[in-house]
Each structure stands twice: as structure tokens, then as C-alpha cells.
Amino acid sequence: MVKKTMKQLTRHCAAGVVPFAANIVTFTVLFALNAAPDYQTVIAFIVGGQVAFWTHDRWTYRVRNPSLDGWKRRWCWFMPGQIGGALLNLYVAIQLNDAYDYWLWSIVVYVLSTAAGVTITFSWTNWLSHKDDSSTDPAEHAKEHAQT
């Protein structure tokens, strides 16, 4: 089980390059616009999260969900994890932002709050929204896809 989870985490991190790029571009634009550091990181996290859903749904967890059938259900299950991650991201950013106020600190806030948020979203995605249904009855799985 641990080996399987580590493999999934590795695949999750590799697939995270695309949403990370969306996240860092959003952060950079907001930084250039002089948005508050806590808003820079949480908005970037949310944008990256939406890109992450598609990246992970179609690559990381494609074995579990080989077609787009059921994507709306998976997205609805994905969003609470995304919101939880964004809230933790914002909380960490606010706590860190209250400590110092200079441009380098914005980057520190970004890195630490993003890491905190990713912990929540990975856990939620791996074990809830895109959980491994291989132990369930294949007939039940087929019924679910027929209803979507």
C-alpha cells in the first residue's frame, strides 16, 4: 500500500508541472500588479487547482478513470479538497505575511503556503475524489458510468 501511494505521489508531482506553471504565472502577474501576498498565493492556488483537476484526471488517475465519464462527479468531489487546500494556503499566507513585509517574503509565503495547500489537495484527490475503485464490484462501476 505504501509503495502504491508513493508511486501515486510521484506521478501526482510529475503531473503537477502544468498546474504549477499556471499557478506561478498567476502569482507573477498578481505580484507585478502589487496584490497583497496572501491574495497572490491563494488566487494562484485556485487557478492552478482548476488546471490540476484536468491534468490529474486525464493523466495521474487515468487508470482509475479511463474515460471522461463521471468527470462532473469527480470535479464536484475534487472541489472540497481544492477549497480546503486554498483555505489552508490562505491561512498560512496570512500568518506568514503578518510576520514580515518585503518582496522576498512574498516568495517565501508563496512557497510555504502552496506546499501546505498541496498536502491537503493531494490527500483529498488520492483518497476521495479520484479514489481507487478497483476493490469495488465491476458491475457497480459500470452502472455508475452508465448513469453519467
Image (tube, grey):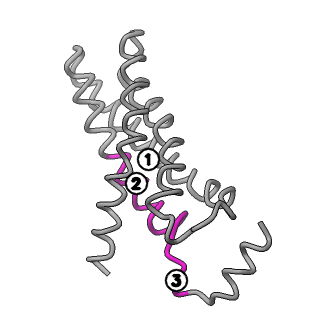
Q: How dense is the environment of label 2, judged by Cα within 10 Å: few (below 14), some, or many (20 and up)?
A: some
Q: Position of residue 138 (x, y in %)?
A: 63, 87
Specify the segment rendered in magenta: 116-135
The residue at the point 64 percent across, 55 percent down is 76
42 vs 64, nearest the viewer: 64
Label 3: element kind: loop
The residues bearing labels 3 and 2 have C-alpha atoms spaced at a distance of 23 Å
Q: Report the label total.
A: 3
The residue at the point 50 percent across, 34 percent down is 47
Foreground label between 3 and 1: 3
Residue labelled with disc 3: 134
- Occupied quadrant, residue 145: bottom right
For the residues labelled 1 and 2, say whether their Cβ atoms are less than 8 Å apart: yes
Is 59 displayed left or right of 93 in the figure? Answer: right
Residue labelled with disc 1: 85
Marker disc for residue 120: 2
127 vs 58, nearest the viewer: 58
| Among the two numbered marks 3 and 1 on one chain, the one whose residue lies closer to the N terminus | 1
